[in-house]
Image (cartoon, rainbow, N blue to C red):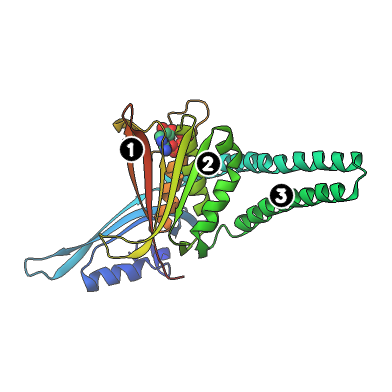
Amino acid sequence: VRDAVPEASGQGYVEVLDRVYESGEPHVAHGSRILLARRAGFPLEPRFLDFIYQPIRDTDGAITGIIVLGTDVTDRNRAERSLIQAEKLAAVGRLAASIAHEINNPLEAITNLLYLVQLTEEKTQRLSFLKMAQQELDRVAKITTQTLRFHRQSTNDRPVCLQDILENVIALLGGRLRNADITVERDFATRGEIIGRDGDLRQVFLNLFSNAIDACRTPGRIVVRLRNAVDLSTGERGVRISLGDTGIGMSQPVRQRLFEPFFTTKELTGTGLGLWISKEILDHHKGKIRIRSSNAEHNHGTVFSIFLPDRKP
Ligand code: ADP
Ligand code: MG
């Protein structure tokens, strides 16, 4: 490798080979970034590789060599990144619409209250209208500051509070929930403090809630639950969030394809990228997602259950 791809030295690849040789453990990497000299005299080019280092042993078990298999997945990576970008843009558009909606209600109230102030002579009455207007303004301020806070903190891993994120998502979707006559039941046994990216996690829950709203026929019900939990398969501690809806549920074929990019049953309104992206984000958090769903005629609905482990910062 040192002879054939000299530019790989100094990028960690030769070191990994040495480690495989010493430990005898195979090494598998997905979408690993490497700078390669593709044409003589040109600068190094960033490429992405899937690769496997598999030690080969002789009959005594001694390592005699390593099979190195590398696949250039740069084009696939680029395509995936532009998909993520597309869904992020769509999510931003939906978010902007929700925020505009949430801000519009208090603004209408303020307009009416100020009109009443102009008509009223009586001082205590005027003061009470002004006080109500002030409360509506506080609502607007709360929505905008929360949104800005999430926006700024979106890209780094840091302590986050899942309860706050869920409350923010519910507040942002308030208009849609009211219009569709869907009640939200909260069952929070913990604040859900973990290390993560709050902007990304908010996108996951925004999408799960939107999907639940889309699935519900009015009137409907969504139950959101937050618990400290242990992942039974690994013994890891963490938080479990579950989101249940009384929506139409899913058929077996839909359940199987849920996480595929572009898979949607909402012909005009869906991008089919929401859950695919959510899965990526949860993978980054080393999280797990499980789904139970029934589309039986009298007992239908869906529960998404997510486990997020406590991780060190
Ligand atoms: P989109 O919402 O744009 O369709 P998603 O990736 O968010 O894309 O969801 C993919 C599909 O999964 C949806 O079109 C829908 O068929 C199904 N789905 C997701 N969540 C639910 C739910 N809570 N109830 C019923 N179907 C759901
Ligand atoms: Mg969706």
Q: Residue furthest bottom?
A: 22
Q: Residue 244, can we see it?
A: yes
Question: Which residue bears the numbered disc 1?
Answer: 293
Residue 71 position in % (x across, y down): 34, 50
Which amino acid is tagged 1? Ser
- Residue beneath the point at 53% across and 29% down: 269
Q: CA distance from mark 1 to mark 2?
A: 25 Å
Q: CA distance from mark 2 to mark 3?
A: 27 Å
User: Under 8 Å from ligand 1: the CB of mark 1?
Assistant: yes
Residue 110's image quarter?
top right
**Disc 2 residue crowd, few under 14, some 14–19, many 20+, Cα 10 Å:** some
Residue 47 position in % (x across, y down): 45, 53
Which amino acid is tagged 3? Val
Q: CA distance from mark 1 to mark 3?
A: 37 Å
Question: Which residue bears the numbered disc 2?
Answer: 87
Residue 220 position in % (x across, y down): 47, 34
Asked if residue 144 lies left or right of residue 71, the reply is: right
- Residue beneath the point at 22% across and 67% down: 25
- Residue beneath the point at 16% across and 67% down: 64
Task: Point out which mark residue 140 bears.
Answer: 3
Which amino acid is tagged 2? Glu
Q: Residue 32, can we see it?
A: no
